[in-house]
Amino acid sequence: MLERRFVFRPDGLSLDGYAIVPDDPAVLVVLCHGIPGSAPRDRGDEGYAGFARELAGRGFGAFWFNFRGVRGSPGEFSIAGWMRDLEWALDAIDADAEIGGIPRVVCGSSAGGAVAIAVGARRADVAGVATLGTPASFTYGALVDDPRKLIQIFRNTGIVHDPAFPPDLDAWWSEFLDNAPEDVVGKISPRPVLILHGDSDDVVSYPHAERLFIGAGEPKELVRIPHGAHQLRRDRRALDAFVDWLGHLPTLP
């Protein structure tokens, strides 16, 4: 079992990535977290490190990191910034002699799924994309309101720290409006897409999954998790469905 720490530097920021890779994995899964809530993590929740170890225990490699502004990573939250973070993570993997040759699937939760879709749609080295509780667009909940309210929510959450950020609030806000996942998910085809969503998700409602599925090209799969909540990485049924999908992917380059 290979376990490694990586450092990559999007926009001059220093972000840490971690890989856990069993012998001869068919796939390396790049995990993208969502926007964290303000509540502390439950005791016993190992986060994405635990998710990665679950995948490694089932024979798949995994790579995870914290986007800018989150859990000690430097920088301020923006959708475009998170996209650059993922691009740099993929470049760091690609340049590595030990894991660079493993086909890569990107799996993202919530806003991390939106980033996975956007980056996967424009990078041929992404062999497939899976999403968990991901919005079809960002016009839901608090995001429907004005950007001044939204930036304050993110300050309270702790992913925007600099009182002078963003320098242009309208441009920052437009990144949400201009990067609707349902508008670009079709560009991932002919690479596969898996959409996992709980039908009791009270953060991103289930119809978002249906809209993503309509927008996606073939091959695509939608898995509805009965009574599933928003944080699907902790739902064993979602993990089992994801692993099953990984195990049945077409031959990857």
Image: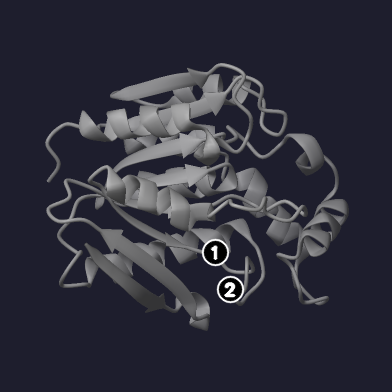
**Mark 1 packing: few (<14 Cα in 10 Å), some, or many (20+)?**
many
Q: How many marks?
A: 2
> Residue 124: x and y, percent?
25, 49
Note whether residue 38 is visible: yes
Tell me which residue sits at (60%, 56%) in the image: 79
- Residue 54 is tagged as none
Q: Is residue 211 above or below residue 140?
A: above
As helix, strand or loop, the secondary structure at mark 1 comes to loop
Q: Is residue 17 above or below residue 36?
A: below
For residue 224, side relative to residue 94 (left or right): right
Note whether residue 105 is visible: no
For residue 161, side relative to residue 231 (left or right): right
Mark found first going from the N terminus, 2 or 1:
1
For residue 199, side relative to residue 46 (left or right): right
Q: Quadrant of the N terminus?
A: bottom left
Amino acid type indicated by mark 1: Phe
Q: Nearer the viewer, residue 181 or 69?
A: 69
> Residue 17: x and y, percent?
41, 69
Q: Are marks 2 and 1 in contact (CB under 8 Å)?
A: yes
As helix, strand or loop, the secondary structure at mark 2 comes to loop
Tell me which residue sits at (85%, 42%) in the image: 145
Amino acid type indicated by mark 2: Ser
Q: Is residue 69 above or below residue 64?
A: below
* Residue under numbered circle 2: 73
Q: Nearer the viewer, residue 185 or 15?
A: 15
Q: Is residue 178 above or below residue 70?
A: above
* Residue under numbered circle 1: 67
> Residue 35: x and y, percent?
65, 52
The span from disc 2 to disc 1 (Cα, nearest Å) is 7 Å
